[in-house]
Amino acid sequence: MPAPASVRPVEGSYAISPDTRIRVSGSDRSARPARRVGDYLAGLLRPSTAYRLPVTTRSGDDGIRLRLTPDAAGARKLGEEGYRLKVTGRAITLSARSSAGLFHGVQTLRQLLPTSVERTTRQAGPWRVSRGTITDVPRYAWRGAMLDVSRHFFGVDKVKRYIDQLALYKINTLHLHLSDDQGWRIAIDSWPRLTTYGGSTQVGGGPGGYYTKDDYREIVSYAASRELTVVPEIDMPGHTNAALASYAELNCDGVAPPLYTGTEVGFSSLCVPKEVTYDFVDDVIRELAALTPGPYLHIGGDEAHSTSHEDYVAFMDRVQPVVAKYGKTVVGWHQLTGAHPAKGAIAQYWGTDGSEKEVAEAAKAGTRLVLSPANRAYLDMKYDANTPLGQSWAGYVEAKQSYDWDPGTYIKDAPASSVLGVEAPLWTETLETSSHIEYMAFPRLPGIAELGWAPASAHNWDEYKVRVAAQGPRWDALGIEYYHSPQIPWPND
């Protein structure tokens, strides 16, 4: 999971043993990234196997060999994230052009081993990997998951836990929804009350919380170690009550509203005519861009029901150039296409039928699309009427419905080439713990990951449901709480 692009099986297997070494190689500039992946692999395997698995730069034709070969003949076909995994009776050889490719290949190797490899105590083995060759490249460049930390706050360790789960399925983008009506979650030095006051609560009136700049850097660094790029989102001009409550001058009437702990949407708006609004936006984007090494910054833009269309367009015309000024590419929810998307902008689609003409027209004009249809990819939608968590405004979304669609043809009249990828958002109005996150994400998240990675020809529900069922024991070993969908033939059910 996700299904590889090409698999050529061969009779037999390779057995990881107490004598196995992890051999890393590459040019001088690439040896260090290969070593990082080797150390990561060793860290995964040592607890359950109880083998030493030393990581070495000594060459050899045995063991587990990680090779960075950016200039090798044929390597270019692997792109920046692809890999080739060849298993013989003597060695496992994983080659790629980049550390991202090696890392994704390690996830495949991990899934080829018995599920007990995921446990943190010594297991019996044996640790056999079937022989053959897998050559694998992703369909889309953007394979994302969004975590809403505004409605309910999730600390650094909980975000790291989710990052590890995303990495297992070759997700490469973590979109963090850092501000909303219920809480502002990232420290901004020039506007400190955003967090000390605006971050002091959450849905239901809990204590809330926020990330210091060092906290955020830790998340970004950890995500990078798992080959994920963090995309921060500051939602505006709507979804801004936490900011409006923190600073009265951001309101058109100069009066700060009270903090909000409910779940309604569409009632708040920054004051578009006021110049202080753009001083505020500039400061926030400047500080957040400086913290974020990735190329993207998300400015929200959805459900701005308290902002007139004219004001919305004027606001986006002012704000998009600010993002570019600080060296980032604009991402916005698909309502941005109803304004004037900047050149190179990315629109994230969250509708339910792909019929919005302005989205298709923007795509034809060069705006790239990330697809997150709410009735397919929103992980907070209930599975059925009995689901104890989540919402149902986009309907009930069982595992089959979440998986059974094609991103390349979903937006009517949009060119297939405009689709940059897919993303699975998880809104947290009803979610408060890691177990809640996992219950809503699994088993649907791996399906969205597969839509982003695997070739369209591999998308087949009847075949997929068997493969996702086989992931259940792995999630058990990892301690992941998941929904036992009746559509999936779980081995233990």
Image (spheres, grey):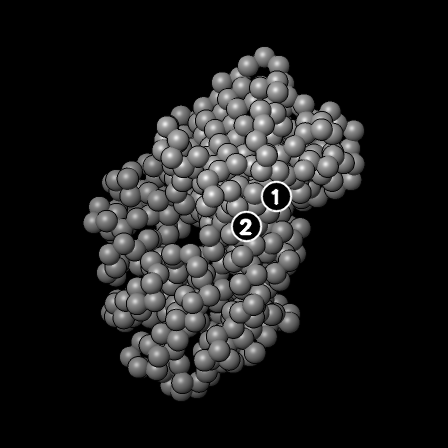
- Local crowd at mark 1 within 10 Å, few (<14), some, or many (≥20)? some
* Residue for point 39% across, 60% down: 297
> Residue 290's spot in the image, x, y percent?
42, 67
In the rendered structure, the answer to whether residue 315 lies left or right of residue 211 reads left
* Residue for point 62% across, 14% down: 12
Tags 2 and 1 touching, CB below 8 Å: yes
Residue holding disc 2: 225
Q: Which mark is residue 268?
A: none
Residue 268 in which image quadrant? bottom left
* Residue for point 57% across, 61% down: 218
Kind of residue at badge 2: Ser
Q: Secondary structure under badge 2?
A: helix
Dot placed on the residue nearer the N-terminal end, 2 or 1: 1
Q: Secondary structure under badge 1?
A: helix
Q: Which mark is residue 40?
A: 1
Q: Nearer the viewer, residue 458 or 403?
A: 458
